[in-house]
Image (cartoon, rainbow, N blue to C red):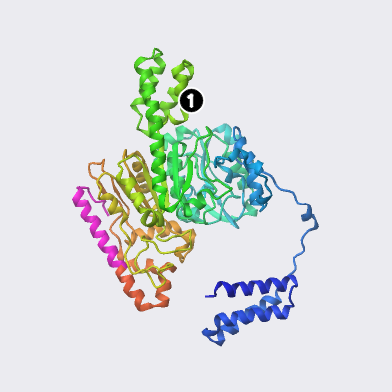
Amino acid sequence: GMGPARINTILQSAFFKLTGIIPEEQAIDLMKAAAKATYGRKGDDVVQKNWAAIDAGAKQVVEITVPESWKDAEDEGLHMTHATEGRQDVIDFVNNIQAKVNAQEGNSLPVSAFKDYVDGTTPSGSSAYEKRGIAVNVPVWNPENCIQCNRCAYVCPHAVIRPVALTAEEAANAPEGMKTLDLTGMKEYKFTMSVSALDCTGCGSCVNVCPGKKGAKALAMENLEASENEQKYFDYTVKLPVKEDVIAKFKEATVKGSQFKQPLLEFSGACAGCGETPYAKLITQLFGDRMYIANATGCSSIWGNSSPSTPYTVNAKGQGPAWSNSLFEDNAEFGYGMLLAQRAIRDGLKAKVEDVVANGTNEDVKAAGQEWLDTFAVGATNGAATDKLVAALEACGCDKAKEILAQKDFLAKKSQWIFGGDGWAYDIGFGGVDHVLASGRDINVMVFDTEVYSNTGGQSSKSTPTGAIAQFAAGGKETKKKDMASIAMSYGYVYVAQISMGADFNQTVKAIAEAEAYPGPSLIIAYAPCINHGIKKGMSKAQTEEELAVKCGYWHNFRFNPAAENKFSLDSKTPDMENYMDFLNGEVRYNSLQRQNPEKAARLFAKNESEAQARYEYLQKLITLYGADKKED
């Protein structure tokens, strides 16, 4: 309830007292005066309680003796958790730029330190070297209770917990004490769940979703200092090669199979328990080695690339998402420009490949070139075809081959994504989003829907539902949430999906895979619980909140696929709306209105529920309209 000025007075007084700038009694008097000015209207009892807290605090100040050796403390240097062969660029950047900036010494850097970054690009994967160690408790794996479902890794916002398949030799060479199981379905491999304890934020989302065995979870949150070996195991396993046959066995577009793929978004600065990053991380696991990302300003640009640290990274081949940020108002157009530029380059290369196939004499080049042409627009297979073509062209060595090889990085079909939040997609950048979706081009738009402008302080957006409190809607938003999905579906040729990971892990990965494979524009709207929601049970329960939102009918999961025989699929079950009000009251953004103005809350919440009911009835009509079979309850 205090204003910034009063809080500042209290903090300054406390600081001055501790540093001896003003006498203790004067500092206490200033703090009490600030407390009275803040709470006086609430009655003398409240003021007295605040004064008692100030008095108690003054008596309990304890002097901490700082060891003399701290004067000569040295930097720990880089934490080499990742294989560094061929990554000297990122090591140099971290040593020369990132370490200085993180130490608040960036102003001391000379202009010459930036000579390798004059075009604005910086190396990917630098967040892996920070090892912040901010968690009090981190997950520790108990193999006895593990069913190897990989859900913990699937929901981890920071990619710190990962399933690993090891050969017998790799398992034998592991650090002493590392626990393993036989990999279910592939006994030739060992299985372990490794945790980067120093990158963990301690949110507990992994433990929350772990099914365990017979009610006993396979993960437990334990003190970081007591779990120091966890980092040693992670440092070993993260350098092991990804097992492609394991991914093929469990299929990459599944919850379990996808998690054996390397996350190419790791150790971001997102809030503990973030609802956005699990979606983005999953997308990088599926397509990251060939992704272009245009990112709107907002939370996803802050956790996505806050200078100087970059959490988007690369695989062993040096392939990873090419990421760049644009503004709220033009990010969709920015991503569209990436797509057009890439397509223009590939069309030029296509003409050259067609020439060597039609007129060349090298049979290997002709065969590889034809395979590349046949898969030109199919990202899932064109990458392998590109590798064959490059190998054939390098072996050929002719002039036409050299012309094509000069632009070999552009040969493979790229996966173009446009990332942003609801403030961008529903509001400020909506015109651009609409324009890009209407283009008919093969492009993917991912909306992290927190239903509020999260990064800029929690302002109301057109995605904010009726009755929610936000800035510019302090008395509860009076108007209903904009139906972005229906606007996009009205085009008829746009793939549209609404997903909520915690409600349906399988539907999430299926929708993302379908959207990317669809040869036209795609829009995915993902429900993303946010710290701004004030979830009563905390952000460790973000995935549970996603589940509850769908179960009560607050959110619905569905897919509209223009290429499918039955175009519309309502993937969530008939909601139990008896629990609707319980869901609203479980979040501060709603229950604070209940406390402030019960009559208004009752009116707006009833309107919110009525709109949700109407929304469900509308979606049921789409089932009939598009001839799909509703999922059985």
Q: Is residue 577 visible?
A: yes
Dominant secondary structure (helix, strand or loop) of the stretch shown in magenta: helix
Closer to the camera in the image, 355 or 556 = 355
Quadrant in which residue 310 is drawn: top right
Q: Residue furthest right?
A: 68
Drawn side of residue 69 relative to residue 354, left or right: right
Residue at image coords 61%, 50%? 198
Residue 33 sits above or below residue 591 on the image:
below
- Residue 467 is situated, as x and y percent measured from the top left of the image, at 36, 69
Q: Residue furthest bottom?
A: 44
Q: Which residue is mark 1?
A: 406
Residue at image coords 58%, 50%? 199
- Residue 541 is situated, as x and y percent measured from the top left of the image, at 46, 59
Q: Residue furthest top?
A: 361
Drawn side of residue 32 relative to residue 346, left or right: right
Quadrant in which residue 514 is drawn: top left
User: SS for tag 1?
Assistant: loop
Closer to the camera in the image, 92 or 263 = 92
Drawn side of residue 298 relative to residue 180, left or right: left
Closer to the camera in the image, 144 or 433 = 433
Could you tell me the amino acid type at mark 1? Ala
Closer to the camera in the image, 284 or 455 = 455
- Residue 75 is situated, as x and y percent measured from the top left of the image, at 71, 48
Range shown magenta: 608-633
Does the magenta portion include 16?
Answer: no
Residue 611 sits above or below residue 100 on the image:
below
Residue 83 sits above or below residue 97 on the image:
above
Does the magenta portion include 613?
Answer: yes
Q: Is residue 212 visible?
A: no
Quadrant in which residue 39 is drawn: bottom right
Residue 459 sits above or below residue 567 on the image:
below
Crowding at dot 1, Cα within 10 Å, few <14 / some 14-19 / many 20+, comes out as few
